[in-house]
Image: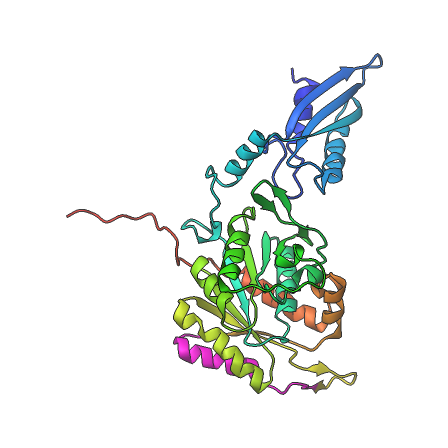
Amino acid sequence: MTTLADRVREALTTVVDPEIRRPITELDMVRSVDVEASDDGAARVRVGVDLTVAGCPLQSTIVRDVTSAVQSLDGVASVDVDLGVMTPEQRASLRSRLRGGNGDPVIPFSQPGSLTKVYAIASGKGGVGKSSVTSNLAVALAAEGLNVGVLDADIYGFSIPRMLGVDRQPTRVDSMLLPPIEHGVKVVSIGMFVPAGQPVVWRGPMLHRALEQFLADVFWGDLDVLLLDLPPGTGDIAISVAQLLPGSEIIVVTTPQAAAAEVAERAGSISLQTHQGVVGVIENMSWLEQPDGTRLEVFGSGGGERVAASLGAALGKDVPLLGQVPLDPAVREAGDEGTPVVLRDPDSPGAAVLRDVARSLAARKRGLAGMRLGVSPVAR
């Protein structure tokens, strides 16, 4: 017959580490299960759990979930959770297991078997709302049931942590980083490591190394989509993304203004040199809806269509205008509060367009670029 201890271990398979997103039993975090019977037939259960690091920021969540899972079993009177910390050997084994048996850091998204769709959100100039678009697309994609990560690659002008409401650093498991998760999205940014108000003053090689570390040293898990919020322009980071993530695709953000559109074309045209695909163009701040239903085109009109047409002609393929996001105060307010508008006010005009764009991205299939096809030449 199944003992209560066996049933407790089975119940613990439903408890998921909130950072790694895998069962704690699979991660060898369950150290022990002790059952002490009482005179009235009920039992006290003591579960030993080893945290990945001392002072784990989400240890209270683990204690709560373990207690809840075990307390629900028949015959359990009380549950005690005894927290410990993994030994260096246990952490080394964990890192190797999470990296697929390879103890050395690798960029999972550049491996031939990767199924993750990687989108680099680019713009020609700053101030067009690229980070707002990135954060809202990430949360909207997560709401579609996808596993989503965001890498804030705008090293100098990072803003993703504020827009997604992230206020803590990744958890460090020796040389591996576990990214914070907010609104169902895994997030990493240099802004998590820099004191408030302090600028990042780095040259090109340091930028490349930082991006490489964020891609390889962070445990992203099995992502369906990774979004990179790029800095404006076509500088070091854009080139490094193409080198480190050759299968990545570009989404260009612009405003309707002619001057912004001309610069955005150059940001998209980098794909001709880097051999990346261009998914499409998003026009932000397209118009301001008036109380009487009319539209005030604050920044002009047609910029998104011009960028899409120009890139399509240069690339020799259709580049669609994915959406036109109106100038919506709710988008700005939600970003400042750390809850993207697609969650805070999903029926607002801006949120509706962003959710439609996210659905179109979710429906796209992963391309074959960089993937191993499993065929070999036949000898004649």
For residue 51, what is the image quadrant? top right
Question: Where's residue 271, x and y in %?
Answer: 43, 70
Could you tell me if residue 245 is visible in this image? no
Question: Where's residue 320, x and y in %?
Answer: 50, 74
Question: Where's residue 267, x and y in %?
Answer: 50, 74
For residue 22, what is the image quadrant? top right
The vertical placement of 171 against 185, above or below, is above
Q: Nearer the viewer, residue 73 or 105?
A: 105
For residue 195, what is the image quadrant? bottom right
Task: Specify whether residue 306 is painted magenta.
Answer: yes
Q: Residue furthest top?
A: 39
Q: Residue furthest left?
A: 380
The vertical placement of 270 against 189, above or below, is below
Magenta extent:
296-318
Q: How many marks?
A: 0
Give the residue displayed 79% in from the left and 19% down from the top. 43
Q: Residue furthest right?
A: 40
Give the residue displayed 64% in from the left and 36% down from the top. 52
Give the residue displayed 65% in from the left and 62% down from the top. 160
Could you tell me if residue 172 is visible in this image? yes
Question: Where's residue 364, x and y in %?
Answer: 50, 61
Locate residue 244 relative to residue 124 in the image: left or right: left
Locate residue 11 relative to residue 318 in the image: left or right: right
The vertical placement of 196 against 42, above or below, is below
Q: Nearer the viewer, residue 323 or 151?
A: 151
Task: Specify whether residue 39 is painted magenta.
Answer: no
Q: How is the image coloured?
A: rainbow
Q: Nearer the viewer, residue 68 or 236?
A: 236
